Amino acid sequence: MSSFKVQIFGAGALGSLFGALIQHAGFEVHFVARGKQLEALKKSLRVEGLRKMELKVDVSDKAVDADVTFVTVKAYDTEEAAKSLAKVDPGVVCSLQNGIGNEEILAEHLDNVVGGVTTYGANLKDFGVVVFAGEGVTYIGEFKGKGIEKVERVLKDSGINVEVVEDIKEKIWEKAVVNSVINPITAIFRVKNGEILRNEFLWEIAKKTAKESEEVAREVGYEINAVEAVKIVAEKTAENISSMLQDVMKGRKTEIDFINGVIVKEGEKRGLDVCYNSFLWRAVKAIEKVRG
Ligand code: KPL
């Protein structure tokens, strides 16, 4: 197996978890990281939670040649990741990111791109320490070029639940619609995901936003029962601090442009009313400015 190389481009919570599971399964793995996470990973990568392990990992701040590369950077860093990967031979490149449009950006620079969405839960407890917070499903689907079977094999052999779907964009939209509700509301009101269901005022905003996002998705071509989907995810992740709230609390940029921002633009193009998405988008941008 050692001649088959997997690269994790972006060693945040999800990248670190998947990279650890893949390396633990016997694959050769290279992590691309930066800053304090890079320094921590040079010592070790520890996984806590559902599974526990401590690994010595191969890490640098540069992309290398690989057979399969998973891109797990924040959506606003996709362009930079794509340009770095275009300088080497990254093999089949699979996006496992939040938001809409990552695959399109990767495909502008790379030949073989697979789309992906995952519901696995992971939190970065500290630099070099990731908590495995919940098993989920990873959906992958062809986007550009070839090689999806290599991606499927790596995930399957690593014990990661994987499903190959016909239209990955449908799964990407499904996740983005749920994120368009839970992420900005939790980030603005500083609450855990479950509070959206418990607080009458927040639930009213959530329902209105969900209906609006659902309407945009329908016009784009995807039928999603958004209110129900938000209910299910908020219940299942009730104790989670959403990724957007984590970003806001750390004074980091959020992925709002790639979630509500895209929904607003797609809705406006079609003459739809997107006032709730627009409000949430602008509110999170204002928070970013104040804290950034
Ligand atoms: O995907 C998520 C996120 O935080 O980005 C949810 C599903 C809302 C879980 O927290």
Image (cartoon, rainbow, N blue to C red):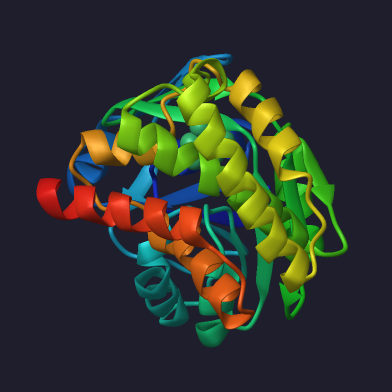
Which residue is at the far right?
166
Picture quadrant where residue 93 is located: bottom right
- The image shows residue 178, relative to residue 236, as above or below, that is below
Residue nearest the viewer, comparing 110 with 276: 276
Image-based side of 57 in relation to 2, left or right: left
The spot of residue 66 in percent (x, y) is 55, 64
Image-based side of 218 in relation to 256, left or right: right
Residue at (45% x, 51% y) in the render: 30
Residue nearest the viewer, comparing 245 with 127: 245
- The number of numbered discs placed on residues in the rendered structure image is 0
Residue at (32% x, 64% y) in the render: 62
Residue at (54% x, 86% y) in the render: 108
The spot of residue 142 in percent (x, y) is 78, 69
Residue nearest the viewer, comparing 126 with 97: 97
The spot of residue 120 in percent (x, y) is 61, 33
- The image shows residue 108, relative to residue 47, as above or below, that is below
Q: Can I make out residue 120 in this image?
A: yes
Q: Can I make out residue 74 in this image?
A: no
Image-based side of 270 in relation to 13, left or right: right
